[in-house]
Amino acid sequence: MTNEKLGLVVSDFNADITHLMSKIAEEHTKFLGAKVTKLVRVPGAFDMAFAVNELVKKKDIDGVVCLGAVIEGDTKHDEIVAHNAARKITDISIESGKPVAMGISGPGMTRADGVKRIESYAKRSVETALKMIRRLK
């Protein structure tokens, strides 16, 4: 099957990283023969679950890709954000029966680490969503 339709949920937090991830993900989606039908920007990774939950309800979306960067700070806040986002995103995927790929880098990562991971996380998350859609249809 080709022409799968993806939704992208992109965090605005650490936008210097995530907006590049978004552009790369959109280009890679086209390269792989699929289409981004909806792009939703949210304040941060912690806020993604609500947007993901809305996107999986849409008939014109076969799967969702989440893109974000959770940078380490002076506290363990990055761990709380990343772990809770991952857990809820996984729950939504299982409950909806649609793949939701997690392209959220971190926790415990520096800004330099986040920059290094832009391309790999963007591309791998698109590939993951499309592989799951294609293998389960």
Image (spheres, rainbow, N blue to C red):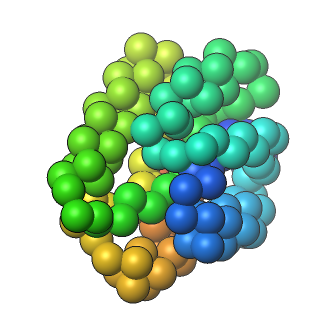
Residue 48 visible in the snapshot? yes
Q: Quadrant of residue 30?
A: bottom right
Q: Horizontally, is 28 left or right of 83 in the view? A: right
**Percent position of residue 71, x then y:** 36, 65
21 in relation to 36, above or below: below
Considering every residue shown, the one lying at the far front of the view is 74
Q: Quadrant of residue 72?
A: bottom left
Residue drawn at x 43%, y 38% is 46
Considering every residue shown, the one lying at the far left of the view is 76
Q: Which of the pair 14/19 is nearer the observer?
A: 14
Residue drawn at x 32%, y 77% is 110
71 in relation to 137, above or below: below
Q: Which of the pair 109/75 is nearer the observer?
A: 75
Residue drawn at x 18%, y 52% is 76
**Percent position of residue 69, x then y:** 45, 61
Residue 9 visible in the snapshot? no
Q: Which quadrant of the figure contains the N terminus? A: top right
**Percent position of residue 31, x then y:** 73, 69
Q: Horizontally, is 109 left or right of 18 in the view? A: left
119 in relation to 6, above or below: below
Q: Which of the pair 23/110 is nearer the observer?
A: 110
Q: Horizontally, is 10 left or right of 116 in the view? A: right
Q: Which of the pair 128/20 is nearer the observer?
A: 20
Q: Horizontally, is 101 left or right of 91 in the view? A: right
Residue drawn at x 72%, y 20% is 58
